[in-house]
């Protein structure tokens, strides 16, 4: 079996290679331009020096009777130094060659220079003696005569100086590139640190150590972290909704299952009657399952566009609770006008009445009362009260939290009142706990119509 090695794609490597390539391209381009400018500058300096030495050149021209002996200044510049010179006419035909140029056989300098004279300086030629020369063009007028003088200088020394300058330039460039690479690596790892921290925080979120990412990220990552935090919050909220829905469903089904058990143990019912009662409870269970699944998907949002008659549902729940708590012989009162409606979903009303009435039946001594009305502020009011021991003032606000129970002596999960509070809040209503005239607890639900 042949193993194939595929390197991982790294954003940092791509950034390094791209940035270093750009720096190298710009750096070598600048080095090339600097070398050209240095060569041109050297050429211009040499040309300026030769112009300063024109009197000496003129003295050499005088030796060959090319300049009439009309001024004494030529004698002052009659130095022993000799130049490799060629004199050209306006068409760059060679008309005179200095003695040094003759000795080297340089008789075609003007014609060969004419081929490159339109190029940019410095001018470089390999001439007849197979040596390289830098050519300097001097257009001068001496004693009324115009000359196109080509002064040739051996290129070896100048080339050596240019090579030395080029080497120093590229060495400096290499040092700059090395420093740039170090800075790029530092900048890359410094710039990638927020992403490394984000990965670490996401791992902590995955392990349950954190719930959201921290906020102190660079501006460029703020949008990403905000989107991730929103996603994490939504995911956590959805998970909580599913968990709460399952707990609520289990809590709601518990009473219905108890009712089914009571029906099956009721010797006063025949088989047909028991089957009808059981099917009624099963139907309510089916309704509760659908309701809780919808809540798990959508969350608790009050559906005010719906309306539900209160009296029939309360009567149905009371009949079920009579079966469950038949040993207590509870006296139940319902003061609910037949036309009064709950401004919301039937499942919500079933949860509200079911939880409050079940608590009342469970904790009462012998009496439970349910009433519904509309107050002067256009609000629907539902009241459930009993004659039990009531609720201590210190825990009235705590028992609407999940898992908190007022009576730890009786079985329960502390879910019912929390569910009621969530539903009432979703309708922008309020849930209040007071002392009842029956000497027990009084739960008042107020919901705007």
Image (cartoon, rainbow, N blue to C red):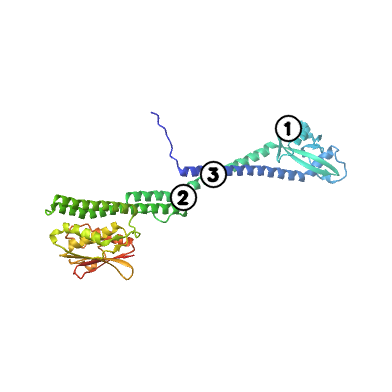
Q: Is residue 359 at all visible to an observer of this figure? A: yes
User: Residue 249, position in %: x, y?
Assistant: 25, 53
User: Residue 171, position in %: x, y?
Assistant: 57, 42
Q: Which residue is mark 1?
A: 127
Q: Quadrant of the N terminus?
A: top left
Find the distance from the CA under tag 3 to the CA under tag 1. 40 Å
- Residue at figure coordinates x 62%, y 40% from the top left: 164
Residue reaching furthest to the top: 1
- Residue at figure coordinates x 27%, y 61% from the top left: 310
Q: Based on the displayed image, in which of its 4 quarters is residue 320 positioned?
A: bottom left
Q: Which residue is mark 2?
A: 191
Find the distance from the CA under tag 3 to the CA under tag 2. 20 Å
Q: Which residue is mark 3?
A: 177
- For this rendering, which residue is in front, 49 or 80? 49
User: Residue 24, position in %: x, y?
Assistant: 56, 42
- For this rendering, which residue is in front, 196 or 362? 362
């Amino acid at each position: 079996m042949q193993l194939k090695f595929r390197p991982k794609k790294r954003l940092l490597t791509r950034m390094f290679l791209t940035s270093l390539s750009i720096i190298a391209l710009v750096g070598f381009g600048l080095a090339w331009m600097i070398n050209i400018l240095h060569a041109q500058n050297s050429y211009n300096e040499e040309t300026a020096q030769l112009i300063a030495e024109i009197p000496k050149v003129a003295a050499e021209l005088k030796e060959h009777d090319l300049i009439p002996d009309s001024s004494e200044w030529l004698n002052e510049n009659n130095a022993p130094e000799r130049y490799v010179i060629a004199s050209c006419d306006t068409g760059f035909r060679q008309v005179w060659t200095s003695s040094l140029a003759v000795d080297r056989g340089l008789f075609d300098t003007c014609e060969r220079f004419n081929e490159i004279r339109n190029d940019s300086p410095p001018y470089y030629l390999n001439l007849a003696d197979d040596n390289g020369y830098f050519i300097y063009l001097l257009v001068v007028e001496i004693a009324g005569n115009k000359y196109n003088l080509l002064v040739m200088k051996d290129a070896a020394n100048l080339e050596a100086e240019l090579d030395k300058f080029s080497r120093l330039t590229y060495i400096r460039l290499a040092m700059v590139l090395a420093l740039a690479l170090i800075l790029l690596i530092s900048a890359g790892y410094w710039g990638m640190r927020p992403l490394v921290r984000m990965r670490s925080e996401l791992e902590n979120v995955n392990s349950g150590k954190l719930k959201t990412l921290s906020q102190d990220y660079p501006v460029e990552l703020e949008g990403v972290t905000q989107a991730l935090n929103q996603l994490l919050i939504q995911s956590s909220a959805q998970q909580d909704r599913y968990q709460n829905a399952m707990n609520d469903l289990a809590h709601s089904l518990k009473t219905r299952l108890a009712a089914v058990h009571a029906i099956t143990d009721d010797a006063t019912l025949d088989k047909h009657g028991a089957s009808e009662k059981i099917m009624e409870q099963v139907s309510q269970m089916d309704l509760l399952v659908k309701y809780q699944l919808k809540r798990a998907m959508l969350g608790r949002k009050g559906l005010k566009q719906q309306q539900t008659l209160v009296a029939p549902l309360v009567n149905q729940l009371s009949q079920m609770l009579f079966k469950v708590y038949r040993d207590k012989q509870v006296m139940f009162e319902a003061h609910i006008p037949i036309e009064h409606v709950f401004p919301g979903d039937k499942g919500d009303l079933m949860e509200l009445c079911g939880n409050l009435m079940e608590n009342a039946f469970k904790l009462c001594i012998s009496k439970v009362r349910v009433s519904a009305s509309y107050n002067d502020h256009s609000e629907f009011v539902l009241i459930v009260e009993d004659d039990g021991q009531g609720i201590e003032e210190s825990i009235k606000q705590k028992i609407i939290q999940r898992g908190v129970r007022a009576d730890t002596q009786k079985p329960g999960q502390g879910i019912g009142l929390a569910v009621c509070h969530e539903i009432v809040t979703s309708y922008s209503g309020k849930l209040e706990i007071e002392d009842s005239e029956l000497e027990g607890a009084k739960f008042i639900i107020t919901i705007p119509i």
